[in-house]
């Protein structure tokens, strides 16, 4: 298999943590239903490929995201192996479902804009906090770890540009509910590198440390890898990515796939940055999943390596 030549660049972190979202963000947007056994196998293969965190599914309303309506069945299939995998919960009802299964990591997902809060959560920007506050408090009381996402950080399809101050204010408020990490979502992939640098600087200025921040890039405009590099230069060490570049949000139709795990791994390998992921195993997994979904992976690295001689 081809590998990039290693040439470290000064001033970048030595190691990053890849937070795999393919089974959740990737599969929530599929038009067809993926069999639950295939989802369990996808997750097991990703863990075996060395992904340190695999977000498994969502305990949202099954009518809102029918693709993930099998969340409880999936977690049942994974058994003890699944207990430490994070899942999305939007509210106390979702949390109850996660608690019943003995799960230990949940993620809430808020919006930096009014329009997306209404469309994705059926709540206003302010009302989302009323929903999240008891959810996070009860999760923490039960000993769970909570991640917070904030969406539309780099632009919103209904509102256009989103002021940096608004993104910082909403994101910090979500984090301060009691999260251990805040993931900054470029939900529709419109962000560019300078914007990433400016947003991260604004969060640091507001008192957050880059260690508390993760970047969640969608690759709609082909900017995800450049944006990840800009975030590395600002010291970020957690990157959300999706095997094979699957992904999107059913409530933001301009959202397409996430930054592909394999594309990120290729760049990190070239920079000599450790991540613990076996690239060949990840490519094999994404190629298998592309077969399950019946279409080729959008990841450039998966496509190139799937064709290159062993
Ligand atoms: P709602 O209709 O306002 O719900 O939806 P409600 O609170 O009025 O409750 C209505 C009924 O739904 C009740 O049942 C509840 O029990 C039930 P009834 O009493 O009528 O029989 N219900 C539930 N059932 C199962 N599980 C639940 C649940 N909650 C309520 N969790 C709600 C509000 C938040 C539930 C809905 O809007 C929803 O599920 N939204 C989720 C949308 C979603 O999953 N979007 C994709 C994930 S976000 C994303 O992809 C972005 C991200 O990747 C970052 C980025 O890219 O930026 C994270
Ligand atoms: Mg997303």
Image (tube, rainbow, N blue to C red):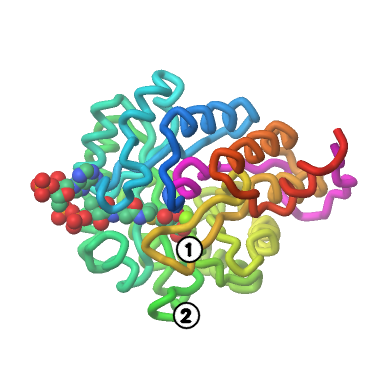
| Coordinates of residue 268 in the picture (x, y in percent) | 74, 47
> Is the magenta region chiefly helix, strand or loop?
loop
Label 2 environment density (alpha carbons within 10 Å; few <14, some 14–19, many ≥20): some
The residue lying at 53 percent from left, 35 percent from top is 53
User: In the figure, 262 relative to 39: above or below?
Assistant: below
What is the x, y in percent for residue 192? 62, 71
Q: Residue furthest top?
A: 80
Please, is residue 71 above or below residue 89 in the view?
A: above
The mark found on residue 187 in the picture is: 1
Q: Which residues are magenta?
A: 1-27
Q: CA distance from mark 2 to mark 1?
A: 13 Å
Residue 190, quarter of the rendered image: bottom right
Please state if 278 lies on the left or on the right of 200 as rendered. right
Camera sees residue 294: yes
299 sits left or right of 304 in the view: left
Judged from this view, the residue extending furthest toward the front is 294
């Amino acid at each position: 298999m081809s590998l990039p030549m290693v040439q470290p660049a000064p001033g970048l972190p030595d190691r990053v943590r890849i937070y795999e979202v393919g089974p959740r963000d990737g599969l929530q947007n599929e038009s067809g239903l993926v069999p639950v056994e295939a989802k369990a196998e996808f997750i097991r293969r990703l863990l075996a490929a060395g992904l340190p965190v695999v977000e498994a599914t969502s305990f949202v309303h099954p009518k809102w995201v029918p693709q993930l309506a099998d969340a409880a069945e999936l977690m049942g299939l994974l058994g003890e192996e699944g207990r430490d995998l994070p899942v999305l919960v939007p509210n106390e009802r979702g949390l109850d479902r996660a608690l019943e299964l003995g799960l230990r990591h949940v993620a809430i997902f808020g919006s930096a804009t009014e329009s997306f809060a209404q469309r994705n959560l059926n709540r206003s920007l302010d009302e989302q906090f009323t929903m999240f506050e008891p959810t996070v408090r009860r999760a923490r009381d039960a000993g769970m770890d909570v991640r917070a996402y904030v969406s539309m950080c780099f632009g919103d399809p209904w509102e256009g540009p989103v002021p940096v101050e608004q993104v910082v204010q909403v994101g910090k408020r979500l984090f301060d509910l009691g999260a251990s990490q805040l993931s900054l979502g470029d939900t529709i992939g419109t962000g560019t590198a300078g914007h990433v640098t400016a947003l991260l600087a604004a969060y640091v200025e507001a008192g957050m440390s880059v260690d508390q921040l993760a970047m969640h890039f969608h690759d709609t405009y082909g900017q995800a890898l450049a944006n990840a590099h800009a975030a590395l230069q600002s010291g970020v060490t957690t990157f959300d990515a999706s095997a094979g570049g699957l992904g999107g949000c059913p409530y933001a139709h301009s959202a397409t796939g996430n930054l592909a795990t394999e594309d990120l791994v290729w760049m990190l390998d070239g920079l000599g940055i450790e991540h613990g992921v076996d690239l060949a195993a990840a490519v094999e997994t994404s190629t298998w999943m592309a077969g399950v979904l019946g279409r080729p992976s959008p990841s450039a690295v998966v496509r190139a390596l799937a064709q290159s001689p062993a």
